[in-house]
Image (cartoon, rainbow, N blue to C red):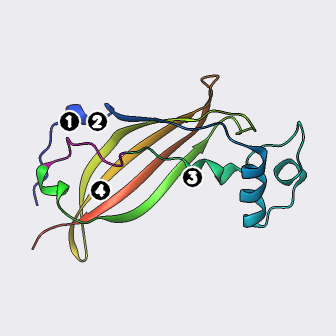
Amino acid sequence: MALEFDRSILGREFDRSEFAPVTADELIAFSRALGASQRCYVEPGEELIGHPTYCIRFRSSRFFPDTLPEGLQARMSFDAGKDIELGAPIRPGDRITVVSTVHDLYEKTGRSGSMVFVVVRFTITNQRGELVATVDNRMMYRGEG
């Protein structure tokens, strides 16, 4: 499948989602569910921070933009992995904002044929404008034929 698309969609914001303040109880419950035992993740107080993987619970209200190539919009895809770059830790009271962009769109050919990958970037910040995390979520579509 020859992938043709308007490259101007790359890096363009297509969604912005804001979340209610994070609570200490949420941070502690998440960390305990993972089996974390370090005090900074499971004990209430000034030192409490979210487990580094807590950022993956935040995603935008729209997963893909309307500007994806038409051939991809109606097809099923599956998760092909995530890359996470961590920034400032999440703390109780933080108000999280997620900005979504299409970071990359590319085609590969493997043993089973052609595959198209769409990389949606979630840029996650707190109310101070600090980068909490950048999550590149890769979705794969099988080629036709």
Q: Earlier in the sequence, mark 4 or mark 1?
A: 1
Say which residue appears at 48% left-offset and 47% top-offset.
59
Q: Secondary structure at mark 4?
A: strand
How far apart are the alpha carbons under marks 3 and 2? 24 Å
Vertical position of residue 80 compared to residue 45: above or below: below
Amino acid type at mark 3: Arg
Bin the neighbour count of mark 2 within 10 Å (Cα to Cα): few under 14, some 14-19, many 20 and up: some
- Amino acid on which the number 4 mark rests in the picture: Phe
Residue sitting at the far bottom: 112
Residue 8 x, y percent position in the rendering:
21, 31
Residue kind at label 2, given as amino acid type: Leu
For image coordinates 45% across by 61% down, the residue present is: 81
- Depth-wise, is mark 3 or mark 2 nearer the camera? 3
Label 4 with label 2: CB-CB less than 8 Å: no
Which stretch appears magenta? 62-69
Q: Is residue 64 magenta?
A: yes
